[in-house]
Image (tube, rainbow, N blue to C red):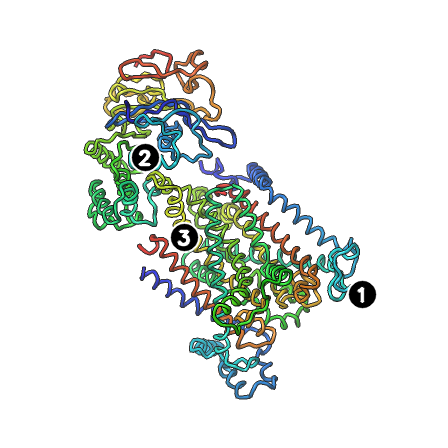
């Protein structure tokens, strides 16, 4: 009897069910109903496109110094104005955007990979392994993020610079550190899924059919955790972008010649009164990026977990 | 309840130890010698250098260095800041009150905004109030604090010239004028932090109240003939606050990050800006001590949050 | 004049797929001191009817589309919230189905009982708590003086339901609506609670509207029975009459589906089940709602909803046929 009727769309000892395709389609429809989220998807898409392809289309150099055009407000020639060295801000913002977005996504990948792994191990093991892992998770949750980031960058920046060069070094450092401090929510989510699903009937059925632990995990438990983890992942991207720009704003992120959005703001903040365009544009860029990611995350939450009262 | 508090205290101790281990591990793993600067810095007197080497026990095995360091940390001997030329604990004590005052005020502001707005939004979901409030909340937590701070300065200080944007801890006025000056210079940093917090808290409150309002005991309360106001405020909100406390406690570490940024922008002499300065000037003892203090503060706040949680939910404390 | 008279009540719910006709034209009358049982399967609208009396339905998405709820001659439907609040717990109270979730977990049990007393009778905190202890005694909770300070999670399910009863009876209402009060409890506890309700009713003289899907409960406790199906009343009669002479095919099906242990081996019959399922309540079809499942269905049945007609004293049926019982 067990195995003849799949208990859920993702539990299927006999092969991929047709039902899972429509589950995604249904979620997509629910997502589209969240208008702000849908709009944000477009906005983010445009932003990513602009940042990726922009430098090929808008061929102004990011380091073209032009003292005659210092601190110029937005114009046709310089749509976002110029900084104190006359460098075009739009070009710099497009370039910086690549880095900010790359850091955001890479950190998210690190955070999710670490989090899901730890959560899965804790969820499967129970007993003392789980207790230890949970204590470590709580510990990391108590660490004040920004100070720890600063400390780690302070200590390891020179070392990494020596090994892989300044840009790659700091990129790796920031990604690993941000990701290393954001794995906890994902771990908790995955562990909770494991605990609630371990004893559910369809997993027991799979076990009764002789499914190995890995198979149980991969085919049955993880897919159900996917929803909340995806939502957590979008939050991670937004948070990582904010963290990176905060670090750069404090002067402790990427090297000064790399114009990440936060770094542009770091330079701009002393000229707030005479050149506010210099601060406004990168700030708005961060804001719009994070806002659209947040809305998308909200839309995903509605789409993937319809049981929640929203 | 006393039992419960005791248990939470007992958990806090290993957490503090754990954090100290992490911090110390970072220090120990750091490539290069953080004290090289000190060795080559002519401003540092040799006795101090020797004392620091002894305190950090750079020639001893790792675990011994750790216990030594931990012991001196716990005794309040936090070393000497060779950048500022005073003992680190003195330096921190100088700067701590300002930071605590600003953080405390932002927490209160956040509560005062998030609670009523969140409750109202939940009681009338999808109304225009709810939609506006929720959208504002999203905007609020998508704006990085440094950008909001800059915008505030741009608007209130530069354009309108209403508020000063450089913080002065020593204001020469007395009496009401002193309070007024302090208020004027604190409004912006406190608002920047507080409103950012309020943005995410409001979402938590709304979501939690929405969940609770559907529950059976709320219908029971209505069936007793209580006014809707009493039903929501007395029966629903009290329960809705319970998960919110947990969520807020989880966010506390980020609060210190926000404080650091705010102190930088508004040039407030708190421990946040102290940390930045120390990092920029390679002042290792200060870095270690400040991070330790911040972590201890987080644990303290978590403990307080646990106590509030236990007070709110009798199922926890009355086993 | 009946104490409570529900006339032509229609409560509908707005859903994504249309309006759900949960209660679609229901007439029920309850006299002073009477126990009326309302039976029907899940989804037939009995709970919604009960909650509509006290207007405890979420409106939106619910809406009282038509009808009157006459309480001592006064229609409750158009009453504003302030007026309803004076009636709730003081004149009409309600006991819910799920004792595990019906009590607020963060307040002491005594406080929750005292709340209605302080509100409706203006008692001081101390007096209200003293009365709460008396109520706990009344519902047979041991050591009530101590238990009054306990929290709900310190009580078992059956005890919590007793506390709910204490809350419901605190202000001595004239009508108690019991919405499936024992469905979530063990059978033995069920018996105790029903027994308690019966005794309290005798002592305090209140009317009871007992909602249940268990025919056995109704047979024991009720004086009159109202049978509901798909949002409408299909039969009502005094209890003995209903069980002896059920007239509506649905009622007959219900009664015949009760297992009988009193029949010996020679008379063993197969347990009858009513085939089919409840019709959609969203834009329900014309005609008798039971038509799709009825053994005796005729074409006239599908044309118009049969009205309730009197077939014996106090016995009304919503069926155009004269079926043997």
Residue B169: % across, % down: 53, 72
- CB under 8 Å between callouts 1 and 2? no
Cα separation between marks 3 and 2:
32 Å
C-beta proximity under 8 Å, tags 3 and 1: no
Are the residues flagged by discs 1 and 2 from a single subunit? no
Q: Secondary structure at mark 3?
A: helix
Which circle, 3 or 1, is nearer the viewer? 1
Residue density around tag 1, few if under 14, some if 14–19, many if 20 or more, within 10 Å:
few
Q: Quadrant of the N terminus of chain B?
A: bottom left
Q: Are marks 3 and 2 on the same chain?
A: no
Q: Nearer the viewer, residue C228 or A193?
A: C228
Q: Name the residue that disc number 2 marks.
A: C87
Q: Which residue is mark 3?
A: B242
Residue A224, numbered label: none
Question: Hey, which quadrant is residue C206 in on the image?
Answer: top left
The answer to whether residue A284 is above or below residue C293 is below
- Chain for numbered disc 3: B
* Residue marked by disc 1: A68
On the image, the x and y values in percent for residue C258 come to: 30, 25
**Residue A231's x, y, as percent?**
55, 49
Say which of marks 1 and 2 sits in front: 2
Q: Residue at x 54, y 64 (%)?
A: B184
Judge whether residue C225 can be spotted in this image.
yes
Asked if residue A209 can be seen in this view, the reply is: no
Q: Are marks 3 and 1 on the same chain?
A: no
Residue A60 appears left or right of C185: right
Residue A234 as seen in the image, left or right of residue C11: right
Q: Measure the alpha-carbon separation of dots 3 and 1.
A: 60 Å
Mark 3 or mark 2, which is nearer to you?
2
The answer for which chain carries disc 1 is A
């Amino acid at each position: 009897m067990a195995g003849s009727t799949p208990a859920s769309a993702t539990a299927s000892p006999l092969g991929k069910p047709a039902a899972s395709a429509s589950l995604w389609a249904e979620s997509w429809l629910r997502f589209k109903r969240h208008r702000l989220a849908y709009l944000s998807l477009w906005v983010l898409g445009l932003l990513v496109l602009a940042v990726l392809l922009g430098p090929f289309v808008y061929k102004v150099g990011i380091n073209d110094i032009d003292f005659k055009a210092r601190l110029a407000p937005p114009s046709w020639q310089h749509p976002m104005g110029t900084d104190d060295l006359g460098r075009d801000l739009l070009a710099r913002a497009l370039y910086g955007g690549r880095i900010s977005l790359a850091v955001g996504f890479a950190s998210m990948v690190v955070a999710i990979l670490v989090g899901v792994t730890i959560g899965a191990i804790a969820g499967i093991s129970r007993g003392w392994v789980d207790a230890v892992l949970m204590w470590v998770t709580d510990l990391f949750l108590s660490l004040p993020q920004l100070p720890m980031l600063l400390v780690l960058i302070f200590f390891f920046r020179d070392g990494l610079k020596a090994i892989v060069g300044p840009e790659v070094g700091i990129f790796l450092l920031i990604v690993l550190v941000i990701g290393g401090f954001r794995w906890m929510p994902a771990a908790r989510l995955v562990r909770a899924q494991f605990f609630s699903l371990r004893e559910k009937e369809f997993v027991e059925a799979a076990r009764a059919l002789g499914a190995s632990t890995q198979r149980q995990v991969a085919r049955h438990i993880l897919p159900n955790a996917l929803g909340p983890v995806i939502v957590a992942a979008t939050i991670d991207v937004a948070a990582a972008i904010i963290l990176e720009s905060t670090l750069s704003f404090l002067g402790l992120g990427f090297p000064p010649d790399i114009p990440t959005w936060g770094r542009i703001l770091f330079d701009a903040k002393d000229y707030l009164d005479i050149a506010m365009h210099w601060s406004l544009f990168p700030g708005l860029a961060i804001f719009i990026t994070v806002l659209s990611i947040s809305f998308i995350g909200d839309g995903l939450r509605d789409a993937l977990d319809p049981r929640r009262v929203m | 309840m006393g039992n419960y508090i005791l248990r939470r205290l007992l958990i806090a101790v290993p957490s503090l130890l754990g954090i100290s281990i992490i911090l110390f591990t970072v220090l120990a793993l750091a490539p290069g010698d953080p004290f090289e600067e000190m060795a080559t810095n002519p401003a540092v007197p040799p006795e101090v250098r020797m004392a620091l080497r002894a305190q950090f026990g750079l020639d001893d095995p790792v675990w011994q260095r750790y216990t030594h360091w931990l012991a001196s940390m716990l005794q309040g001997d936090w070393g000497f800041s060779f950048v500022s030329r005073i003992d680190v604990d003195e330096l921190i004590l100088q700067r701590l009150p300002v930071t605590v005052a600003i953080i405390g005020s932002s927490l209160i502001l956040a509560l005062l905004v998030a609670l009523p707005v969140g409750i109202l939004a939940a009681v009338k979901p999808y109304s225009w109030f709810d939609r506006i409030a929720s959208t504002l909340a999203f905007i609020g937590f998508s704006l990085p604090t440094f950008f909001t701070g800059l915008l505030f300065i741009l608007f209130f200080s530069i354009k309108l010239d209403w508020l000063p944007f450089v913080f002065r801890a020593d204001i020469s006025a007395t009496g009401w004028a002193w309070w007024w000056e302090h208020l004027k210079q604190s409004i912006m940093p406190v608002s920047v932090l507080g409103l950012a917090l309020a943005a995410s808290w409001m979402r938590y409150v709304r979501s939690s109240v929405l969940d609770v309002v559907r529950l059976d005991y709320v219908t029971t309360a209505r069936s007793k003939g209580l006014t809707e106001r009493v039903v929501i405020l007395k029966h629903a909100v009290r329960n809705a606050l319970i998960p919110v406390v947990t969520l807020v406690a989880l966010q506390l570490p980020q609060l210190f990050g926000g404080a650091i940024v705010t102190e930088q922008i508004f040039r407030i002499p708190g421990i946040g800006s102290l940390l930045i300065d120390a990092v920029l000037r390679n002042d290792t003892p200060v870095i270690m001590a400040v991070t330790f203090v911040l972590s201890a503060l987080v644990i303290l706040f978590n403990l307080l949050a646990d106590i509030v949680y236990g007070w709110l939910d009798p199922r926890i404390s009355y086993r | 004049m009946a104490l409570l008279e529900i006339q032509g009540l229609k409560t509908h719910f707005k859903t994504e797929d249309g309006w759900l006709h949960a209660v679609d034209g229901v007439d029920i009358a309850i006299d002073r001191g009477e126990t009326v049982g309302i039976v029907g399967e899940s989804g037939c609208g009995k709970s919604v009817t009960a909650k509509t009396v006290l207007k405890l339905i979420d409106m939106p998405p619910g809406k009282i589309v038509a009808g009157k709820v006459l309480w001592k001659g006064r229609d409750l439907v158009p009453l504003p919230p302030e007026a309803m609040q004076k009636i709730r717990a003081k004149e009409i109270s309600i006991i819910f189905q799920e004792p595990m979730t019906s009590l607020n977990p963060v307040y002491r049990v005594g406080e929750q009982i005292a709340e209605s007393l302080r509100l409706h009778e203006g008692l001081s905190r101390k007096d209200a708590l003293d009365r709460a202890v008396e109520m706990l005694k009344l519902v047979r909770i041991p050591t009530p003086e101590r238990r009054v300070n306990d929290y709900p999670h310190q009580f078992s399910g059956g005890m919590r339901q007793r506390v709910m009863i204490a809350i419901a009876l605190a202000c001595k209402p004239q009508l108690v609506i019991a919405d499936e009060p024992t469905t979530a409890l063990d059978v033995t506890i069920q018996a105790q609670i029903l027994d308690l309700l019966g005794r309290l009713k005798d002592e305090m003289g209140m009317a009871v509207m007992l909602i249940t899907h268990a025919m056995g409960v109704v047979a024991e406790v009720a004086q009159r029975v109202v049978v509901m199906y798909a949002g409408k009343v299909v039969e009502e009669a005094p209890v003995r009459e209903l069980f002896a002479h059920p007239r509506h095919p649905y009622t007959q099906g219900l009664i015949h589906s009760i297992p009988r242990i009193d029949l010996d081996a020679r008379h063993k019959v197969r347990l009858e089940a009513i085939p089919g399922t409840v019709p959609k309540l969203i834009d329900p079809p014309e005609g008798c709602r039971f038509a799709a499942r009825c053994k005796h269905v005729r074409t006239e049945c599908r044309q118009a909803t049969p009205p309730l007609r009197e077939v014996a004293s106090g016995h009304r049926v919503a069926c155009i046929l004269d079926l043997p019982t």
